Amino acid sequence: MEVPSSSKKMIATQEEMVEAKVPIPYRDQCAHLLIPLNKCRQAEFYLPWKCEAERHTYEKCEYELVMERMLHMQKIREQEAKMKGAQKGQLPIPLIPKTADA
């Protein structure tokens, strides 16, 4: 279940996720944060102002995974563009512009 290009490791085991009834689409590298969040939500009757710290931690983890996948895809596109550009003699256009401090 490990993702080879991801820097995050799976912490929650398959048995823990099944026991906590984590839906299959949510069984990613952030599932270990979703389990206590769902327990807190159930204990607090899903009140939106409760469990904010747990929710923030989980959403930050998910955001980092999305950004990691986006950067990985950008690298793949840049490699493909370089290969096409080398064939045509053109320079690739970056999807995300380079900043001054990069």
Image (cartoon, helix red, strand yellow):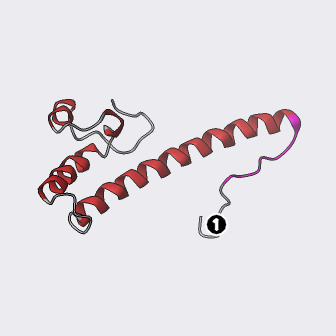
User: Which percent across, then down, holds residue 44?
Assistant: 14, 60
Report the span colored magenta.
Answer: 88-95
Q: Which residue is pictured at 54% across the width and 43% down the height?
A: 72
User: Which percent across, then down, holds residue 5?
Assistant: 45, 38
Q: Would you say residue 79 sits in the magenta stretch?
A: no
Does residue 65 sit above or below 53 in this rendering? above
User: Which percent across, then down, holds residue 14?
Assistant: 22, 31
What's the residue type where badge 1 is placed? Thr
Could you classify mark 1 by the number of other residues whose Cα lies within 10 Å: few (under 14), some (14-19), or many (20 or more)? few
Query: Magenta residues: mostly which secondary structure?
Result: loop
Q: Which residue is pictured at 35% across the width and 53% down the height?
A: 61
User: Which residue is tagged 1?
Assistant: 99
Q: Which residue is pictured at 31% across the width and 41% down the height?
A: 9
Q: Would you say residue 91 sits in the magenta stretch?
A: yes
Does residue 48 sit above or below 76 in this rendering? below
Dot 1 falls on a residue whose secondary structure is loop
Camera-side residue: 24 or 13? 24
User: Which percent across, then down, holds residue 86?
Assistant: 81, 36
Q: Quadrant of the C terminus?
A: bottom right
